[in-house]
């Protein structure tokens, strides 16, 4: 009887053994997981970051007081300011062939700071993890629809843009630019940017 019980247990264990991990030949490999955004700088709990046509605007969440990190400040100052909210930078890179001339970049999750001649020259916010940490002072952010954006600010489409559904928010020299993911009023903002960017038009 004991031997019979042992044989039954062995049989059950064999039946429960998972099959070997084999993927069908026609199945594409799974994409690597997207890392979560950090937003873990020492001031992340008390400071919000506003997107601005003149740079980045830091907002005290308690008082509403703002301070502008303006285009033209040294690279080290810009990196230190953003790191206090966004956390450690992800990478640095350069491109010698940008339409605006050679540029350097520092990326923090979805936000990339652009530099020329060692100075903060522009920013680019992509539709990536961490993008929800940023918006304009009027509340426009990645994912805002065209109809909603047009309700709060002047929105002008850029005609014949080689970048797709490109638009500008506001008026004057220091506008915030962006791109919709598709045409139509329900299309959502897929990217926002200001200052000098590495675009080829």
Image (tube, grey):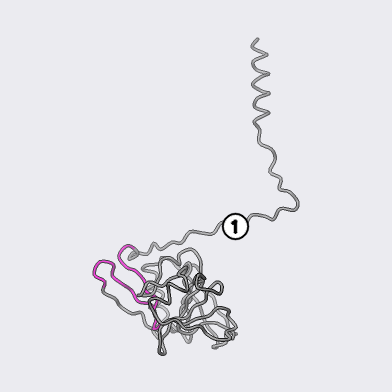
Q: What element does badge 1 sit on? A: loop
- Image quarter hosting the N terminus: top right
Which x, y percent locates residue 5? 64, 15
Residue positioned most to the top: 1
Q: Is residue 23 left or right of residue 65?
A: right
Q: Residue at left 66%, top 36%?
A: 18
Magenta highlight: main SS: strand
Which x, y percent locates residue 165? 55, 78
191 and 15: which one is in front? 191
**In the rendered structure, does residue 58 fall within the stretch colored magenta?**
yes
Q: Is residue 114 left or right of residue 51?
A: right
54 and 163: which one is in front? 163
Label 1 neighbour load within 10 Å: few <14, some 14-19, many 20+? few
Residue positioned most to the right: 25
Which x, y percent locates residue 81? 36, 74
> Which residue is tagged 1?
32
- Image quarter hosting the C terminus: bottom right
Above or below, 24 relative to 160 = above
Residue positioned most to the left: 63
155 and 74: which one is in front? 155
**In the rendered structure, does residue 84 fall within the stretch colored magenta?**
no
- Label tally: 1
Residue positioned most to the bottom: 173
Q: Quadrant of residue 159?
A: bottom right
Which x, y percent locates residue 21? 68, 43
Part of the protein shown in magenta:
45-64
4 and 167: which one is in front? 167
Q: Residue at left 50%, top 81%?
A: 167
Above or below, 3 relative to 131 = above
Q: Quadrant of residue 34?
A: bottom right
Q: Residue at left 41%, top 74%?
A: 79
């Amino acid at each position: 009887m004991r031997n019979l019980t042992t044989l039954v247990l062995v049989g059950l264990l064999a039946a429960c053994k998972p099959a070997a991990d084999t993927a069908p030949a026609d199945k594409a490999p799974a994409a690597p997981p997207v890392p979560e955004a950090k937003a873990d700088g020492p001031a992340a709990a008390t400071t919000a970051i506003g997107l601005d046509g003149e740079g980045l605007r830091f907002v005290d969440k308690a008082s509403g007081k703002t301070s502008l990190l303006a285009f033209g400040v040294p690279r080290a100052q810009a990196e230190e300011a953003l790191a206090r909210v966004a956390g450690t930078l992800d990478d640095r890179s350069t491109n010698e062939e940008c339409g605006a001339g050679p540029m350097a970049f520092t990326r923090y999750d979805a936000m990339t700071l652009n530099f020329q001649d060692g100075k903060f020259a522009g920013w680019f916010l992509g539709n990536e993890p961490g993008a929800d940490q940023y918006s304009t002072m009027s509340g426009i952010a990645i994912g805002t629809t065209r109809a909603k954006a047009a309700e709060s600010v002047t929105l002008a489409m850029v005609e014949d843009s080689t970048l797709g559904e490109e638009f500008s928010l506001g008026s004057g020299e220091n506008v915030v630019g962006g791109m919709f993911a598709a045409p139509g009023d329900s299309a959502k903002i897929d990217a926002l940017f200001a200052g000098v960017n590495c675009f080829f038009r």
